[in-house]
Amino acid sequence: MLAYTLRRIAQLVPVLLLLSVAVFGFVEALPGSIVDTLVGTEGGDIEEARKILEKEYGLDQPVYVRYAKWLYRAVQFDFGKSLVTRRPISFELLSRIPATVYLAVVGISLSMLIAIPLGTFAAVRRNSGVDYTAQVSSLAGISIPEFWFAILCVLLFSLYLGWLPSSGYVSPFEDFWGSLQFLILPAAAIGFRQAAFTTRLTRSSMLDELSKEYVDTARSMGLPERRVIFRYTLRNAMIPTITISGLQLANLLGGTVVLESIFAWPGIGRAIFEAILQRDYPLIQAGVLVLGCIVVVMNLLVDLTYRLLNPRVKFA
Amino acid sequence: MSELEADKLVDGTLAWRAPPVPPRRRRLATALANAWHELRKSRTASIGAVMLVLLFGACIATPWIATHDPIKQNYRARLAPPSEQHLLGTDRLGRDIYSRLLYGGRRLVTIAVVAVALSLLIGVPFGVLTGYFGGLADTIGMRIVDGLLAFPGLLLYLLFVTVAQAWKFEGFMVDVVLVGALAFAGMPEKARLARGSVLAEKQKEYVEASRAMGDSSFCIALAQVLPNIVSPLIVTATVRFGFVILIVAALSFLGLGTPPPTPDWGSDLSAARDYMETHPLIAAFPGLAICYTVLAFNLFGDGLRDILDPRLAER
């Protein structure tokens, strides 16, 4: 396990380097340079300002030197300043992370709360009404675009019924109950969609387990059905379910750009989206790099957990 | 050459005569009939197939079945409810929603088809070759794939679209960039799948036989192994269609797709949000259209998986 873990961590290095090259290359692919943007706003002696700025941003050096310098600072979480707010980018990003984590964790928990009982029940009572309901609703959940579902929820619950605010955010540390009000709609929109995937997976892995021979053995030994299901099959069937939920969580932490912008949720996805609208390229660059790293590391953690839960998988 | 044919040649006594080839049109008809017969085995697949035929039919026939110019504004008929003249009513600028849906769908489906086809064209040879050759090629290839997969959700597309906007691309070029990004991002999935299947197929005897007959590695990888991994690829590609459509719609919903007045389900939906409270129908139609399309591909993909992989159909 240790050797495997170390090898996987070693494999991360080229992936992260590739990611950083891609993100750095993205800014290089933009027309003009940062200097044009800055000079344009300040006026005065343009040529002189240009030279000073080029020197300040290190643009007089070749690409690979700039990449190395950028990477060296990025590793220390120093991405320079935002072009728009003029505050350090690391601050802009860090201040947005809690909201995204809050939404993603609650959304995924909600999805697991719906999906695991529903998927299990659908598999145990196969071809029953519950099974069909589970199958149809999960197919719908996969096919309905989340932004449409979200605006329909807003239409129903905030515009017509007036039960919940249509958008906004309150930190749970300031006002817990108040923040829940804002959380319900976006979390439900995430939970519903992710639950659709998880339900399908839980159902099919549960069916897979139920068809195995140890189940017949357990039943023929006279063990009560409840014990067979909860003690044996469910435990095995949970392994893929937990894995997929972990991967979903990783993806959600990587920015639910659409939902965060519909609900004016001050998360990291919305920060990047706003940066795109305002052409704040260094912020986009840093944001994508940070999110990519979060996703890669989360995926590794999920993989390692999977192997801990399921010792049968070989450490290939 | 398959093993069976080789046996017969060695035997020499069995003269194998080809059955007469039916005329081309008959062959096509038989193939379609066979395909339909297979599809009937799965109810989900047949429902999905019918929905897809309707969808593609509408996309092809758009110029004939659309009733209005999708861009033409008519201020005297703004936000009109569905009527004989405007089947689904009009939007905030008095444009016919029915016609806009048709033209928008045509564009969206074209983008999805091209993007998925391209991702297969890049991903499959990539996966087959890395899997077949193994060693360093495999290591490098898989790290590239991992790197691409590190971009969560929409981020990769957002980067591409930002670059396109910064270069002031317009109209068609935006679509080209989007299709490129979608193809690029869809590639890893296909490459991994192809690689996995190739690793499994590589061990089998027919590959050994082919090598013994002196075929080159490249030839074996593409001509012998590839046809054997087609069915999982078809299923993945079908499901990917739904995903691509959701992504394109989401991007244009965010205002990062093709700028107005081009008819587009995502941006029409986004524009309809302002009138949602008083005219909910305007927001309903583009959403329903997206749902219908994605559902059609998902149903078809699910059904296909059951048909092509009987082990799973048991469930």
Image: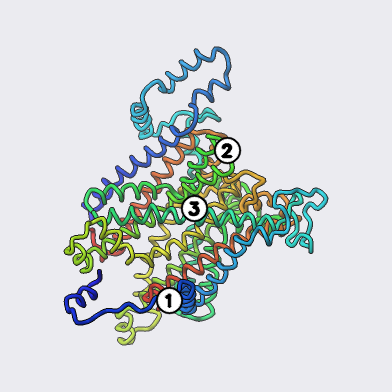
Q: Which mark is residue A74?
A: none
Q: Is residue B14 above or below residue B112?
A: below
Which secondary structure lies at badge 1?
A: loop
Judging by the rendered image, the residue that carries numbered circle 2 is A277
Using the image, name the chain to which the residue with label 3 belongs.
A
| Alpha-carbon span between mark 2 and mark 1 | 60 Å
Residue type, label 1: Pro
Q: Is residue A71 above or below residue B85?
A: above
The percent coordinates of residue A119 (x first, y second) are: 46, 71
The residue under the point 52% across, 27% down is: A86
| Alpha-carbon span between mark 3 and mark 2 | 24 Å
Q: Residues within 10 Å of mark 3 (few under 14, many from 20)?
A: many
Q: Which mark is residue A104?
A: 3
Q: Are marks 2 and 1 on the same chain?
A: no
Judging by the rendered image, the residue that carries numbered circle 1 is B22
> The N terminus of chain A lies in which quarter of the figure?
bottom left
Q: Is residue A207 above or below residue A286?
A: below
| Alpha-carbon span between mark 3 and mark 1 | 59 Å
Residue type, label 2: Leu
Q: Earlier in the sequence, mark 3 or mark 2?
A: 3
Q: Nearer the viewer, residue A166 or A261?
A: A261
Q: Are marks 3 and 2 on the same chain?
A: yes
Q: Residues within 10 Å of mark 1 (few under 14, many from 20)?
A: few
Q: Tell me if B27 is positioned left or right of B2 in this view.
A: right
> The C terminus of chain A lies in which quarter of the figure?
bottom left
